[in-house]
Image: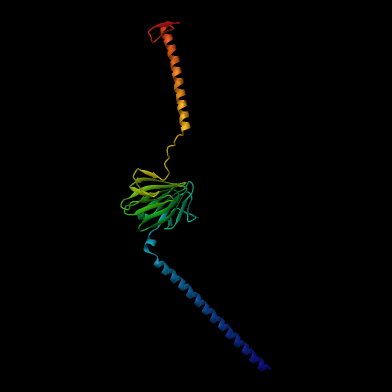
């Protein structure tokens, strides 16, 4: 019995040792798989970073703010970096300056929302509302698009212009250079010192016949009243001057 028990004990110990060895082997294999997966993810991230175009990595803007400004819905701070595709929202009583280096600058007034799109070809932004001033350097195009118009500078020369979009009306003012405005199916060239607005021009109102007749009656009545007053004043003047005598056109004089 003792021999059988000893053999059984040795057998159980052997099984236990083999089980522990198998568990260690499985754990090492799992750790190796996890390490391999982590290395693959790191390599893939590096590969993706290397495939980003140099232009996308080279161009970035620096944000300077006064007040409360949001970038992609989150509070921003002065000195923050913004990239193409960023959405900037300057809240009430806030201002923001986006310095794009060689691509120029954008100045946002309070209550202004824009989406940026910039790169080697120039600067573009979609103005959802508010007012933005564009500083476009020579040799690069700058454009602002609203729901009513598309405004762009000439690529050959520098330009400074402002675009405002409020309640469905786009207004453009050019400080220097010139800007091209496409709106209402036409193209309008706005030069330095000039402005343009998509607001419809007020048409002169036509007066109805009844109103015109009423106006004529009022004018005639006013003229008659003036003549009566002048005639009364004239009679008094004659009486005062000639002692109550009135000259008649026939040349006769009658005194009262």
- Image quarter (top left, top right, bottom left or bottom right) of the C terminus: top left
Residue shown at 38% from the left, 55% from the top: 123
Residue shown at 54% from the left, 79% from the top: 27
Give the image location of residue 117, x and y in percent: 41, 56
Give the image location of residue 141, x and y in percent: 35, 54
Q: Is residue 15 left or right of residue 226?
A: right
Q: From this viewpoint, which residue is outermost toward the right? A: 1
Judge by depth and name the residue closer to the eye, 27 or 54: 54
Residue shown at 37% from the left, 50% from the top: 135
The colour scheme is rainbow
Judge by depth and name the residue closer to the eye, 14 or 60: 60
Give the image location of residue 210, x and y in percent: 48, 32
Give the image location of residue 102, x and y in percent: 35, 55
Judge by depth and name the residue closer to the eye, 99 or 183: 183
- Image quarter (top left, top right, bottom left or bottom right) of the N terminus: bottom right
Q: Is residue 85 above or below residue 17?
A: above
């Amino acid at each position: 019995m003792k021999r059988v028990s000893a053999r059984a004990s040795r057998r159980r110990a052997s099984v236990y040792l083999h089980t522990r060895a198998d568990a260690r082997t499985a754990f090492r294999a799992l750790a190796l798989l996890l390490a391999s997966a982590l290395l693959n993810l790191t390599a893939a991230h590096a590969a993706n970073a290397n495939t980003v175009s140099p232009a996308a990595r080279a161009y970035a803007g620096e944000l300077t703010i006064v007040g409360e400004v949001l970038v992609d819905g989150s509070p921003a701070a002065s000195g923050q970096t913004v990239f193409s595709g960023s959405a900037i929202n300057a809240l009430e009583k806030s201002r923001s300056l986006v310095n794009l280096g060689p691509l120029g600058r954008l100045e946002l007034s309070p209550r202004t929302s824009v989406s940026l799109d910039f790169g080697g070809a120039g600067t573009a932004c979609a103005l959802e509302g508010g007012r933005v001033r564009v500083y476009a350097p020579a040799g690069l195009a700058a454009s602002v698009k609203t729901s009513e118009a598309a405004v762009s500078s000439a690529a050959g020369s520098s330009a400074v212009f402002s675009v405002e979009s409020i309640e469905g009306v786009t207004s453009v003012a050019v400080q220097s250079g010139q800007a091209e405005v496409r709106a209402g199916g036409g193209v309008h060239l706005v030069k330095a010192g000039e402005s343009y607005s998509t607001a419809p021009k007020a048409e002169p109102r036509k007066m109805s016949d009844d109103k015109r007749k009423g106006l004529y009656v009022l004018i005639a009545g006013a003229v008659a009243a003036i003549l009566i007053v002048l005639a009364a004043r004239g009679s008094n003047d004659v009486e005062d001057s000639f002692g109550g005598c009135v000259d008649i056109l026939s040349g006769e004089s009658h005194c009262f």
